[in-house]
Each structure stands twice: as structure tokens, then as C-alpha cells.
Amino acid sequence: MKPRKSLLITALIAAILVVSGEIGGGVWLVRPPQKQQNPVSNRNPLVIGGRQVDPHSVGTVPVAPSQLARPGFGIPYLPLLDVLLLVTYFFTAASILLPERAIAPASAVTSLIISLLVLLASILGIFTALNLTLAMVGLLLSFPFGTAVYLAVWGSFPVGAAAATLGVLLFLKLAFAVCLLVANPRFIQNKGLVLLTGTSILAGVIVAFLHGLPPGILASITDGIAGILVGVAGLVWAIVVLVWAVIGLVRIIMAARLPVPG
């Protein structure tokens, strides 16, 4: 079956929109109204768990007009998976439309670089989220003063704004998957692409679930847990893509060393 180029391009656009939205851009996504900051927020912030926080700016979500709501760790960590998905899909689709000999070297080198960057970012992100989550739990359990600080700093989490963002991202990911299936059912045979797509969709669902599961005052903690889980998933997939890239490079080098039949 000949692939439908228009649907392949539509899927690529959907994947790009997902990544750009998760990184922080896009007027095309839902964004909450910007709240006014308290005039006294210029006071020196507290330093808790290695993070500067201002208890006087509780509940404020600084969102520029061209950005969507990406509070906490769960949503900002989703690109760890979706960047890998975008790169994998791009070269998979390119290999269908172009000769594999022309695509393979660029695919292997790009996948190697991106997977290494995601690997490092995942490790750093996991420890960052883990450190702050443990700090929040420790404060919450340190009644009464620690609990008061926790409630002042992290007791309010914009669950609604995060849910709106995750809803749009989930719609785009489902549109991406449907476009792939309709464009060419043979994409299902690419187990790596299918599993990575499923992991990306599942990660968004888990983040949304952990945001809505506890009472509002605990959402910041469960968001930290969501960030850790997404970071671990990104780490695993970065290793998988890295191994694929190394194997691909080895095959290309070995093929180049083969004698040309005269």
C-alpha cells in the first residue's frame, strides 16, 4: 500500500506541535489568565530543597501571552519522550519516501546525539524532581511549621490549567497515531515506533491521573512523582534509542568497508 504523503505530513505537524507545546511555546494551546503578583513579592525568597520560593506569590502562574500552562514537573518532562518520538518518526517516514541508503547515516547520527542529550536530561531531571519531592514531603510531615511552609509555597497547584494543557496534548498525540495508521497500516509493524507512541500517550495519562488523584494541597507532591516516572521512562527509551543508533552506525561502517564488486 502506497503511503499517503498528506497524512504523513499531518502526523509530523502534530508531533512538532506536541513537542513545541510541551517545551513552552504555542499560542494555539489553552492557556490560563495571568494572575497579578502580590506587590510584596519582591521580598527575599525562601530557599527550600535547593529551590528559591516566594510564599507571597502563592497561586500565581507566570504565563506569557505566547505560552501555555506547564506547571510542576510532569508536563515539562514529557518532551523527554516526545523528542525521541519525533526524531524516530521523522526518519521512519523519510525512509519510506526516500532511499534508505541516503537516510540511514543521518538517522543513526541524529538519533545518537538526541538520545545522549535526553539521557543526560533524564538523569538530571529525575534527581531534581526526587530532591524537591522529598523536600515537600518532609515539610508536609514537619507539623506545624514545616506544614505551614509547605501549604504556603506548594499548597496550591493549578490542576485545571494543567488538565487543559494535557487534554490538548493528548488529542494531538491521538491524532498523530491515527494519521500513522491511516497513512500506512504497515507502521504497526514498526514495534519500536508503536511502543514509543504508546508510552508517550500513557505518560500524559499518568500525569493527568496523578494531578487529579489527591486533594488539591497534595497535587504538587504527586506532580513531583509524575515527573520522576516520566523521567525514568525517558531514561529507558533514551538507552533503547542509543543502542539502536550505535548498532545502525556499526552496520553503516561495516557496509562501507566491504569491497566494491568489480
Image (spheres, rainbow, N blue to C red):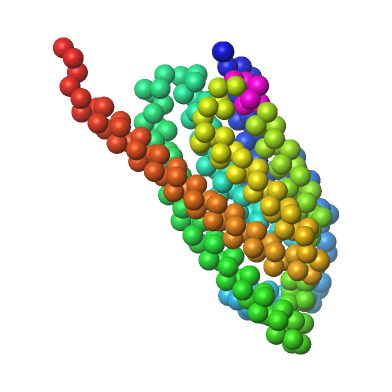
Residue 223: quadrant of the picture: bottom right
Determine the main secondary structure of the stretch shown in magenta: helix
112 to 139, vertically: above or below: above
Asked if residue 135 shows in the view, the reply is yes
For the point 83% across and 64% down, which residue is it?
A: 36
Q: Nearer the viewer, residue 64 or 106?
A: 106
Q: Nearer the viewer, residue 196 or 88?
A: 196
Q: Quadrant of the C terminus?
A: top left
Give x and y (percent) for residue 255: 26, 27
156 to 18, vertically: above or below: below
Give x and y (percent) for residue 228: 59, 60
Residue occupying the far bottom of the picture:
144
Q: In the drawing, does residue 100 fall left or right of residue 187? A: left
For the point 52% across and 33% down, which residue is it?
A: 191
Asked if residue 10 shows in the view, the reply is no
Queried whether the magenta region covers residue 81, the answer comes back as: no
For the point 74% across and 74% down, which residue is it?
A: 153
Give x and y (percent) for residue 32: 81, 53
Residue 149: quadrant of the picture: bottom right
For the point 78% across and 58% down, which residue is it?
A: 212
Q: Quadrant of the N terminus?
A: top right
Which span is picked out in magenta?
179-184
31 to 87, vertically: above or below: below
Give x and y (percent) for residue 233: 55, 52
Residue 185: quadrant of the picture: top right
Count of residue discs: 0
Q: In the drawing, does residue 109 fall left or right of residue 33? A: left
Q: In the drawing, does residue 14 fall left or right of residue 122? A: right
